[in-house]
Each structure stands twice: as C-alpha cells, then as structure tokens.
Image (tube, rainbow, N blue to C red):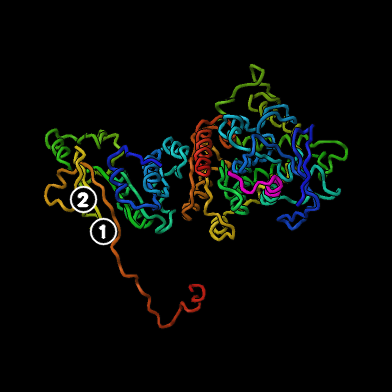
C-alpha cells in the first residue's frame, strides 16, 4: 500500500490519500480511492510505543486541540489533549482523523464519488479506514484508542477488528448498540433534513444551497438529548431572553429557545447535511449486543492483553450507565482487565466534553500508569 | 521492585496466604492498597470492585483494574473459578446477604480469604454487658444508627455457617487487639473471647464429580465437539 500525504493549508490538516485501494465496505460497496484528513499532536517516540488515536463523536472532527480553522474556535477536546493535559502531548503522540463519511476534509457524501450516490458507511468502515491510516504512518501498535459517544463505538470496534494493533481503550459514554430511543431521535433529525425543500434528495450543493432549516432543527433535537433536565434547569430555568414579559407569540421568549436556535444556526455553518444523514445512520447500525462477547472470546486475533477503561455519567440518558455496565459485565465474565467508573454529574451525555475533574483524573492516571508498565 | 510494607496488619497476613503469580479479585478494594501490595510482593494479577465512587476513581487513576460497583449485585457476572483467590477484607459484616456473598466468593474463586472484626471479643461483650448499649470500638467505630455494619457475628457464628455451607477452613489467623497473631484452629479455649480480628482462608470440600450414566448415550452426537 502506498499512501500519499499532503498538507491542506486552508484546512490546517494533513491529508492521507489512499488510491486504488478498493476499500470494501460492510454494505458490500467498494470505494476505490479515498482520503482522510487528520491532525497529530506531540511526537512519536523512537520505539513508536506512544501513539494514541482519539476518535471523534458524531459532529466532531480532527481538530481535537489547537485552532479549528472551520469554526475559528479551539479544538473540541482541547481541555483534555495538549501539553500537561490529561492526554499529555509531551508524552504521547496523538492522532485524530475526520471519519470516513465526515465533512472536514475526509471523503464523505459532500464529494459524491463519481457523481453517484455515496455508499452507506458503518462504524466498522470508519475503523477500517483509520487502521489504514495508522498503518501508513508506520505505527504497528497504538498504545490507546480513546473516544466518547460515536468515538466510543469506534474504540470498541477497534477491540473487535484490530485487537492485536492496540493495547487499551478508553470508552466514554458509549454502548454495545444504538438503542431504539437513540435511533428514534436520529430519525427525527434526518426527517427534518430530508423534508427541507432545499435538501433536494441530497443534491442541494448543485445550486450552492444548504438545507439550513432542516439541519438546524436536527441539531436542536440532538442537542436536547446531549443535556439533562437538571442541567437545562440549572442553566436556563424559565428565564426569558432579552425581555421582561412573555410575547404571547412564537419568538424565542425563553432563554432555552434562544440557546437551541443559536446551536442550530452555528451548526449549519460548520456541518454538511448529507454527512449528518450518513453518520447518524452509521451509529444506528452499530450493534454488538449479541456479538461482542463472542467476538472477543473467539477472536482469531489475540486480545487477552487488552485493557479497557469504561466511563459513564449518572445523568446521561442517551447512553445510560446500564449500557456501559453491560460491556463491563461481559468483560468481567471473560476475566478481562477492565476498569469502570460512573461519574456523578448533571451535565448529561455531553459531560465527556465538559469540565469533569474525575474524568481528567482517571484518564490521566490510566494512561500514565499503563504506559509506565510497558515502558519498564 | 521494592517490597511494600503493609499499612494494615490484616493485609500483611492476607499476603502470607497467597502464593506468587496468582489471579486475585479484591472485593471492596478501596483505592487499591492491597492490590498494589499483592502486585508488588506476590506478582499477582489483581482485579477489584469498589462501591465508593471516589475510592474507585483513585484506584483506576493509580492504574488498577477496578470496577465501580456493588458486590452484592455485580458478582454474579464473574465466571466460575475465574480467580485463584477472592478477597473480602473487613466487609462481610456490611453485606445485605453475607451467606450469598460467601458462596459467590467460592464460586468465582478457587479459594476465598475473608477477614472480619470479631463481635465476640471480650471488650465488646463487656461494653454491652456493662453499659447496656451497642458497643463502639476501634474496629467497629460506628454508632448503631449510622453503621454500615449491618450483620454482626462472632467467630463461633462464622465457623457454624462455614460448617453448614460445607466450606473448609484451610487456615485461620486471629489477631488480638494488641496485634498479637495466633492460629485460631490450634487454640482451644478463649479464641472467640480474645480474637479481635479474624482472617480465614476458605475453600469448598473436595467432592467427587458426579458421573452421568446413560445407557441411551444421549450425549453421543456431541462427542466430536467434546473431544
């Protein structure tokens, strides 16, 4: 395999081109060539033992830390990744790539291969693409794969498909499967996009248009699922927005409305509607409920060495603790090296992106101590 | 690696009961103190369960395999005989169903190590006798209404339960309140009176596996898989 690397100065990202590679997708479709946009932080050590792959969530991207040129803001996990941060780039070489199907420089529906329809993408396909990137970077073994939400799904997929290429995973706010309720929320979001007249069967880009309404409504719905009732109450209550009395109309009277509208609007500026359809679908298709245990137990690839850190949050109702415990219980029944912590917070599913000192502590400690063990 | 000196007396005794290179589950492992000691001094592979969130977080941050959870709910997930030793240190008296826990310990582990404060110690008996109030001591420092220790028992009670459950006591060590150590089984009189803290190494009685006799050979078609 020969991979071409370039730097995209506008995207401030490295781009890896996989040409004539005929990537076979889970759906059976084949992508002959594709590219992945990625960022790296820190330095790979001489023995190449300090590489960590961070997997982003549904609407994340390769900009984990530092500047994100698309939003002009800091990377989505800059509080976690960086020099002397819990995922310490003085010590570790951190890689993050935009997933296959994404819209921040990797091949996705935004480009519509050969003018045809973009094939359906699964979490397994994303991970396969990532594994090719890691191989191209001449890294035989990742020290860790870390992710929250859809990132956690990818981390789990790594343990199933490439256990011999990793040492441990940190799996945050994830599950073995996307639940019926989660699929339902995604479906409402997709319907919002697809019923926007500008969407035009996904061909909106031909007239340089964006189905802004549909995409922003999809984001507003999703955003509610990332919070918790308590957090919303704490943040907004019934407080009014820029007014003293209610308007008896449909303006954004309440702060929570104004906040959601803002979330929807700013999302449209940075995310592609078709990508949103494909990636939510990938999450919906994720299901290792029946197969995870068997996959780990009867894998052809050695996986006894794997260490798992599973983290959940008390107020996360999208990926509730019980889902994490199912993973933990299955690993315990196989006597695997698993750690689990349910963090007490009211910040909901989004907690993994927010200030949670206990999350910082366990991630930092888990990485540092396990790295010390292989470094001995 | 340097040997770690145990912080707690019962930990150093527990260590003496465990051979090198064993796989161990520590129930109520706190921040991993005993796990660290056994990894260092016995090259053990250790797993732990801890109910307290902050302690579990500390243990994980220190690099130990620790599951934040409730032993009374979560032990059922572990497979039969998946550990060499399952340790329950100073926690049996706080369990809702101590008998169920004991049988779980010996289902998951080939052997179990259980330590507990002896409610039959003379100081406790004397306190109850003289003051007429529930005893509060160093090893049982809580008042009756806020104690996590909900099942008080003495060495005699424990021995009876083991007997009833067909559990073999392989070794038993008593500690006096001054830290003097003695073998419970060898002492004849006064054991239940002077033992402040007791540590037991337990296993199930060896039994002959039940052989299924079948003239119909109903299992014959699975024999290929079995072989």
Please state the horizontal and vertical placement of residue B136, each as a whole percent of the image.
22, 34
The magenta-colored residue range is A131-144
- Foreground residue, B34 or A264? B34
Q: At 39% from the left edge and 53% from the top edge, which residue is drawn?
A: B22
Other-residue count near label 1 (Cα within 10 Å), few / some / many at <14 / 14–19 / ≥20: some
Question: Is B217 above or below relative to B196?
Answer: below
The percent position of residue B83, horizontal first and vertical second, equals: 40, 55
Q: Which mark is residue B168?
A: 1
Q: What residue appears at the point 62 percent right and 45 percent down from the top-left corner? A: A182
Q: Which residue corresponds to the image point at 61% horizontal and 48% vertical from the top-left?
A: A141
Residue behind mark 2: B157
Is label 1 in a helix, a strand or a loop?
Answer: strand
- Horizontal side of A154 relative to B170 (left or right) equals right
Q: Quadrant of the N terminus of chain B?
A: top left
Quarter of the figure with residue B166: bottom left
Chain under label 1? B
Q: Position of residue A69 (x, y in %)?
A: 74, 29
Q: Are marks 2 and 1 in contact (CB under 8 Å)?
A: no
| Residue B45 location (% of width, % of height) | 42, 49
Determine whether the residue tagged by mark 2 lies in a helix, strand or loop. helix
Mark 2 and mark 1 on one chain? yes
Q: CA distance from mark 2 to mark 1?
A: 15 Å
Tag 1 or tag 2, which sits nearer the N-term? 2
Q: In the rendering, which numbered label is found on residue B221?
A: none
């Amino acid at each position: 395999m020969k991979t071409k690397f370039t730097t995209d100065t506008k995207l401030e990202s490295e781009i890896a081109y996989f040409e004539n590679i005929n990537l076979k997708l889970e759906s059976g479709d084949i992508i002959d060539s594709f590219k992945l946009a990625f960022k790296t932080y820190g330095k790979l050590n001489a023995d190449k033992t300090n590489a960590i792959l961070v997997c982003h969530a549904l609407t994340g991207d390769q900009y984990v830390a530092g500047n994100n040129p698309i939003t002009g803001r800091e990377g989505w996990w800059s509080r976690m990744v960086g020099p002397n941060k819990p995922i310490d780039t003085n010590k570790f070489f951190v890689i993050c790539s935009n997933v296959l199907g994404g819209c921040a420089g990797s091949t996705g529906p935004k480009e519509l291969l050969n003018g045809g329809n973009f094939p359906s993408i699964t979490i397994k396909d994303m991970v396969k693409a990532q594994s090719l990137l890691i191989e191209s970077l001449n890294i035989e073994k990742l020290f860790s794969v870390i992710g929250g939400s859809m990132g956690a799904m990818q981390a789990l997929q790594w343990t199933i498909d490439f256990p011999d290429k990793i040492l441990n995973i940190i799996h945050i706010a994830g599950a073995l499967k996307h639940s019926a309720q989660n699929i339902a929320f995604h479906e409402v979001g997709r319907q919002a996009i697809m019923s926007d007249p500008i969407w035009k069967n996904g061909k909106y880009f031909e007239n340089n248009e964006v189905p802004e309404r549909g995409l922003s409504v999809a984001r507003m719905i999703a955003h509610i699922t990332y919070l918790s009732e308590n957090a919303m109450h704490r943040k907004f209550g019934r407080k009014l927005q820029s007014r003293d009395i209610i308007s008896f109309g449909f303006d954004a009277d309440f702060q929570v409305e104004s906040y959601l509208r803002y979330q929807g609007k700013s999302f449209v500026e940075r995310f592609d509607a078709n990508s949103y359809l494909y990636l939510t679908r990938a999450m919906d298709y994720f299901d290792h409920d029946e197969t995870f245990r068997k996959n780990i137990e009867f894998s052809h690839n050695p996986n006894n060495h794997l260490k798992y850190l599973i983290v959940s949050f008390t107020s996360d109702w999208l990926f509730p603790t019980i889902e994490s415990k199912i993973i933990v219980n299955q690993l315990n029944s196989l006597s695997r090296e698993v750690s689990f912590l349910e963090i007490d917070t009211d910040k909901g599913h989004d907690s993994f992106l927010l200030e949670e000192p206990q999350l910082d502590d366990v991630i930092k400690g888990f990485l540092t101590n396990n790295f010390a063990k292989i470094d001995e | 690696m340097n040997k770690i000196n145990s912080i707690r007396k019962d930990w150093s005794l527990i260590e003496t009961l465990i051979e090198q290179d064993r796989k161990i589950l520590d129930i109520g492992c706190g921040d991993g103190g005993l796990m660290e000691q056994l990894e260092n001094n016995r090259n053990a592979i250790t797993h732990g369960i801890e109910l307290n969130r902050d302690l579990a977080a500390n243990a994980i941050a220190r690099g130990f395999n620790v599951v934040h959870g409730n032993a009374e709910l979560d032990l059922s997930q572990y497979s039969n005989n998946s550990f060499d030793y399952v340790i329950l240190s100073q926690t049996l008296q706080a369990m809702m169903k101590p008998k169920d826990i004991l049988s779980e310990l010996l289902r998951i582990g080939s052997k179990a190590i259980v330590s507990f404060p002896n409610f039959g110690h003379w100081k406790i008996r004397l306190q109850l006798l003289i003051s007429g109030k529930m005893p509060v001591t160093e090893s049982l420092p809580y008042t009756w209404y806020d104690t996590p220790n909900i099942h008080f028992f003495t060495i005699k009670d424990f021995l009876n339960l083991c007997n009833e459950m067909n559990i073999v006591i392989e070794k038993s060590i008593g500690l006096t309140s001054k830290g003097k150590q003695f073998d419970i089984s060898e002492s004849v009189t006064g054991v239940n009176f002077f033992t402040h803290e007791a540590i037991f190494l337990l296993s199930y009685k060896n039994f002959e596996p039940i052989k299924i006799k079948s003239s119909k050979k109903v299992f014959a078609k699975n024999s290929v898989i079995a072989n």
